[in-house]
Image (tube, rainbow, N blue to C red):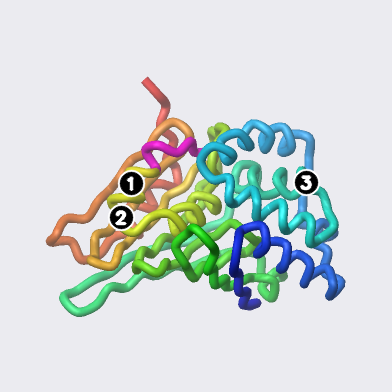
């Protein structure tokens, strides 16, 4: 696993990392998983105004990465903003466990073994956002992490039967780690943000409040623990494998 450190502004962090890879002969756009299609390009363009409104900083990081890689900003946006909306199905699991002395957040990531050496642990300390430690099988988007306030979040990808312009799973986790301190704040944000893909998010904060949140572009369902609950995750995630809420 590669350990990356990201500092200063979002643009500078992206540019520094992209240029470092470029100087070492690593061109992201030449990776076979960097899939750019007309369908994904159209979808990403529909998502772009939402990121410009709610999360322009991450677009700055994407721009910096593209500049550092001497590549196309549009192609990087297409790849990242449409992620989790067109891919094949993977399986991963999150759970939270607590007792009077401990808080435990666990996540299993089931991904392509041949890409194992490319997985990243990222330490983000960027201007204007909460610092966090996150993990990703790609870049910029996050699949799980914990921030400086002890808020931990992990995703479980559910193959999307419906999609809409908005934030995908990895970008949701990244945004929430950078913007929220508590489980209640996460729930509040998810009821405002447009959502692109279909997923469950398992969340726990530093005082032990936890929730599993099933969400897609039409609906947000919150399964929240009570003060007497000590474990959550697996039951709700199994349910969410087939979760599709039809409006009305």
The alpha-carbon separation of the residues under discs 1 and 2 comes to 6 Å
Residue 192 located within the stretch drawn in magenta: yes
Q: Quadrant of residue 102?
A: bottom left
Residue under pointer 3: 75
Q: Answer with mark 3 or mark 1, whichever residue precedes in sequence.
A: 3
Q: Nearer the viewer, residue 105 or 166?
A: 166
Q: Quadrant of residue 122?
A: bottom right
Write down the region rendered in magenta: 190-195
Image position of 116 (left or right of 30): left
Above or below: residue 144 compared with residue 72: below
Is disc 3 in contact with disc 2, using a CB cutoff of under 8 Å?
no
Q: Residue at x 49, y 42 (%)?
A: 198
Measured as percent of width and height from the top left, residue 232 is found at 28, 60
- The mark found on residue 183 in the picture is 2
Q: Answer with mark 3 or mark 2, whichever residue precedes in sequence.
A: 3
Question: In terms of secondary structure, where does tag 2 sit?
Answer: helix
Residue 70 located within the stretch drawn in magenta: no
Counting the numbered discs, the total is 3
Q: Nearer the viewer, residue 109 or 203?
A: 203
Residue under pointer 1: 187
Q: Residue at x 78, y 46 (%)?
A: 75
């Amino acid at each position: 696993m590669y350990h990356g450190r990201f500092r200063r502004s979002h643009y500078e962090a992206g540019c520094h990392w992209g240029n470092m890879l470029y100087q070492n002969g690593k061109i992201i756009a030449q990776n076979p998983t960097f899939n750019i299609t007309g369908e994904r390009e159209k979808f990403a363009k529909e998502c772009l105004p939402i990121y410009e409104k709610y999360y322009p900083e991450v677009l700055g990081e994407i721009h910096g990465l593209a500049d550092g890689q001497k590549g196309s900003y549009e192609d990087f946006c297409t790849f990242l903003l449409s992620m989790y909306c067109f891919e094949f199905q993977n399986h991963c699991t999150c759970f939270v466990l607590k007792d009077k002395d401990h808080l435990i957040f666990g996540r299993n990531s089931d991904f392509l073994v041949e890409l194992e050496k490319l997985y990243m642990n990222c330490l983000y300390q960027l201007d204007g956002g909460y610092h966090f430690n996150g993990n990703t099988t790609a870049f910029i988007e996050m699949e799980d992490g914990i921030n400086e306030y002890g808020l931990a979040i992990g995703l479980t990808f559910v193959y999307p039967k419906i999609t809409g312009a908005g934030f995908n799973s990895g970008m949701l986790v990244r945004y929430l780690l950078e913007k929220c301190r508590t489980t209640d704040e996460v729930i509040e944000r998810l009821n405002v943000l447009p959502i692109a893909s279909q997923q469950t998010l398992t969340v726990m904060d530093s005082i032990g409040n936890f929730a599993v949140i099933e969400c897609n572009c039409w609906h947000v369902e919150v399964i929240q623990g009570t003060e007497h609950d000590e474990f959550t995750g697996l039951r709700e995630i199994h349910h969410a494998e087939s979760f599709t809420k039809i409006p009305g």
